[in-house]
Image: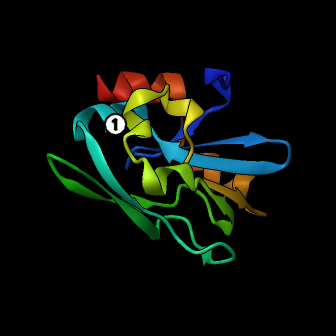
Amino acid sequence: MVARESIFCSKSHEYVYEKDGAYYIGLTDFAIEQLGDIVFVELPEIGSHYGKGEIFGTVESVKAASELYMPISGKILEINEQLIDKPELLNEKEFDEIWLLKVSSEYYNVDCNDLMDYNTYKKEVE
């Protein structure tokens, strides 16, 4: 589990945290709760580059489909392959234990300027 104070969240409900020089991106607990039972996840190609705010994939639930937005600019190093076959893992695990993407970024410190720390984010969505 990741320390909550090291997680930054976007207004579009994606999170990012740094670990061992890479950045992990996922969906916040609020987003997962709002979506309900997740049935499909589409993730980008490894090696592709995305700017902050760009759409990198989609997630579908029994309730709705939602686009996924990059909280920071970066290059995709890895995708969570488990989610392709078992998207329901997003509902079954703690949100910060089931990331979507692992990226490299030179812009993390700049891109995080307008992200909220997890505690502020939770107050915003309550």
The residue furthest right is 20
Choose top left, top right, bottom left or bottom right for residue 101: bottom right
Residue at 48% of width from left, 31% of height from top? Answer: 95
Q: Is residue 97 left or right of residue 108?
A: left
Number of marks = 1
Q: Residue 2: x, y in percent?
A: 67, 26
Q: Is residue 66 left or right of residue 123?
A: left
The residue furthest front is 85
Q: Nearer the viewer, residue 91 or 8?
A: 91
Q: Quadrant of the C terminus?
A: top left
- What colour scheme does the image use? rainbow
Mark 1, residue position? 32
Q: Is residue 92 above or below residue 75?
A: above
Density class for disc 1 (Cα within 10 Å; few <14, some 14-19, many ≥20) is some
Residue at 54% of width from left, 55% of height from top? Answer: 71
Residue at 68% of width from left, 61% of height from top? Answer: 78
Q: Residue 53: x, y in percent?
A: 47, 65
Q: Nearer the viewer, residue 106 or 29?
A: 29
The kind of residue on which mark 1 rests is Ile
Q: Residue 114: x, y in percent?
A: 54, 48
Q: Is residue 3 above or below residue 39?
A: above
Residue at 71% of width from left, 54% of height from top? Answer: 108
Where disc 1 sits, the SS reads helix
Q: Is residue 79 above or below residue 32?
A: below
Q: Quadrant of the N terminus?
A: top right
Q: Is residue 74 above or below residue 109?
A: below
Q: Nearer the viewer, residue 45 or 120?
A: 45
The residue furthest left is 63
Q: Nearer the viewer, residue 121 or 114?
A: 121
